[in-house]
Image (cartoon, rainbow, N blue to C red):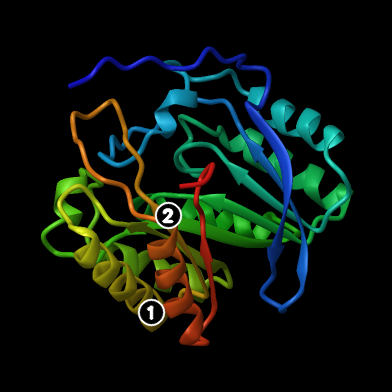
Amino acid sequence: MRLTVKNKLDDQKAYGVFSERELTRSGVVEDHNIILTTNKECSFKCVMCDLWKNTLDYRVEVGAVSNQVRNALDQLPVAKHLKLYNAGSFFDRQSIPKQDAFEIADDLQVRGYETLIVEAHPKLVGTSCFEFSEYLHPQLEVAMGLETVDPSVLPRLNKNMTLDDFERATTDLLEHGIFVRAFILLRTPWQNEEEGVYWAKESIDFSHSIGVECCTVIPLRQNERFDIDFEPSSAETLDEVVAYGQSKNKGRVFGDSWDGI
């Protein structure tokens, strides 16, 4: 295991505040504001994840996250859509207290947002999620990490999730009128390039088959918390997988190349 060092963060400030353009469900490219909140590290220690670098070792006080979001929204341009990510699960109350979640919902309604996208682990999709969605004025969309449907790899990711868990969460979300997007890994340390492409495409197909409308394909990058070496995929490979997904015409498929690969 390699040396791990977290970035120094202020628990009163979101560590990421920016805006980007994205194709919406209606087929129009529109601005999406993005806030990366500062909060407690996710309890799931997934092998492929390096988002822990921008988390805290302690639970923030009630009101801290909603204040982070309020201040970040003041910095952002007017937009219809907001991605609110917390390097874990929005419905993990150790990271996002319930009071903060509902204060955020109130703020978004006042500001006229139409869509809120949050992230969650499939096993944390339940009553707290559905109560929040019913209260929330914008349309809720939950992004979950499917990662891969490769049966030889998914158990090795330490994600504490099965494909049945993911399908159950997706079904429950859709039944409550909540849209779903899936994060899909492109090539893991236990796959060569050809296998990585194959299983990423299979993961897109699985997502579409259970009702996921939006897939984001993410090339795996080195995570120094775990002593795993691998060759990351090329930009051409990412393009191939995204093009495959888009050719199915079953929903939006994006490629997220981080800072470029």
Dot 1: what SS? loop
Inter-mark Cα distance, 2 to 1: 20 Å
Q: Is there CB contact under 8 Å for labels 2 and 1?
A: no
Q: Quadrant of the N terminus?
A: top left
The residue drawn where x is 41% and y is 71% is: 240
N-terminal of the two: label 2 or label 1? 1
Q: Position of residue 142 (x, y in %)?
A: 53, 58
Q: Is residue 26 above or below residue 51?
A: below
Question: From the viewer's perspective, is 233 left or right of 104?
Answer: left
Q: Position of residue 64 (x, y in %)?
A: 66, 22
Identify the amino acid type marked 1: Ile
Q: Is residue 19 above or below residue 173?
A: above
Q: Is residue 248 above or below residue 187?
A: below
Dot 2: what SS? strand
The residue drawn where x is 41% and y is 28% is: 52
Question: From the viewer's perspective, is 252 left or right of 206?
Answer: right
The 10 Å Cα crowd at callout 1, few under 14, some 14 to 19, many 20 or more, is: some
In which quarter of the view is residue 42 placed? top left
What number is the disc on residue 210? 1
Task: Confirm whether residue 211 shows in the render.
Answer: no
Question: From the viewer's perspective, is 69 left or right of 44?
Answer: right
Q: Which label sits in the foreground, 2 or 1?
A: 2
Pick whichever, 52 or 127, lies toward us.
Answer: 52
The 10 Å Cα crowd at callout 2, few under 14, some 14 to 19, many 20 or more, is: many
Q: Is residue 261 above or below residue 69?
A: below
Q: Position of residue 138 (x, y in %)?
A: 74, 60
Mark 2, residue position: 218
What number is the disc on residue 229? none
The residue drawn where x is 55% and y is 19% is: 60
